[in-house]
Amino acid sequence: MAARTPLHARHLAAHAVMVEFAGYEMPLRYSSMRDEHVAVRTRAGLFDLSHMGEVRLTGSSAEATVQRLVANDVSTLTPGRALYSVVCNDQAGIVDDVLVYRVEDGFLIVVNASRRQVDLEWMAAHLLPGTELRDESDETALLAVQGPEAVAIVQTLTDQDVSGLRSFSSVTGEVAGVPCRISRTGYTGEDGLELYCAPAPAPALWDALLAAGAGRGLIPAGLGARDTLRLEAGLRLYGQDMDETVDPYSCGLAWTVKLGKGDFIGASRLHELDPDNPPRRFVGLALGPRQIPRHGMAVLAGDTPAGEVTSGGFSFTLGHGIATAYVAPALAGAGLSVDIRGEAVPARRVPLPFHGGHHHRQ
């Protein structure tokens, strides 16, 4: 039996098509993926991200523990600030990609729903003495408002200055009377805010946001649009674009690795790798208007197998097929194609992101 988020009844009332995702029953779409995608790119979309995991680390050695767990440098974070990072294993394979916030009493780490249990066990096994770990996932609902109108919509419901909030910053305050951590990050390539709150008032907050955004074209958006948006933004999906067999350099995340900060799990292996010439190359590919690449399809250089598609789909914004793929470094400069049902379809290598200026970078 799949778990349900606190907003489950709202999704059913909105006639969402529900699917199982990471052990949760989640909305795939409400209207259409295209409509929801376009709404986020041009106006605003409202997402239920309550399936994500939240882990709090507190105590005198909390910072030292987090520094040991993640590849990025959290010592630079002032209270309320966040950064994106990867958690590596000893071989520099990626255990998960996470957001780390410095909060009032320590650190809040936001983890992927599909990795929550694995991450908890991994963190618990690597805690320094004097660090307490608490899984707050079930007592946290998470709503995201994304798109060019998102901040203006939320601003009408709060006395916090969310318009002045910097990217990768958060404040605590009330939104529509609901106490929230209000954060300005995002996974869509657009500007936007995430609202962390208790489960019980989450449905009322959902309703208030939809009412406040109605005049600005806000609509609820599901997992389908979330995936097409993040792919256009060139952002990685754990389990598709990276896993425990992939190092951060190979998937284009060298910027999240700070070897100079001191030792952390995976650092010794990362010292052996060349960030500019990793074992694999993570590339963006553009295809034709009717050619839709999918995860797992082979990438060819001439007749030679060169790698495979990690994420692929149709870009509603650009009007053609796009994909991210791993290719062998020696073949990354060659003329590439994707094997779509037995046909070698030419693919142009293009820089990431495909679209969207607002980035996970901090």
Image (tube, rainbow, N blue to C red):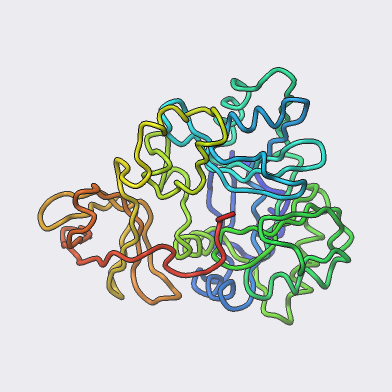
Q: Would you identify the image quadrant in which residue 42 lies? A: bottom right
| In this rendering, position of residue 44 left or right of residue 141 | left
Residue 223 visible? yes
> In terms of depth relative to the viewer, which is nearer, 81 or 9?
81
Q: Which percent across, then down, holds residue 344? A: 16, 62
In this picture, is 117 found above or below 34? above
Residue found at x 73% / y 30%: 134
| In this rendering, position of residue 65 left or right of residue 200 | left
Q: Which percent across, then down, holds residue 56? A: 72, 35
Q: Would you identify the image quadrant in which residue 161 lies? A: bottom right
Q: Which of the image's four quarters has the N terminus?
A: top right
Residue found at x 18% / y 59%: 334
In this picture, is 146 found above or below 120? below
Q: Which of the image's four quarters has the C terminus?
A: bottom right
Residue found at x 49% / y 49%: 255
Q: Would you identify the image quadrant in which residue 274 lies? A: top left
> How many tags in the picture?
0
Q: Which percent across, then down, holds residue 277? A: 31, 45
| In this rendering, position of residue 23 left or right of residue 297 | right
> In terms of depth relative to the viewer, which is nearer, 60 or 338?
60
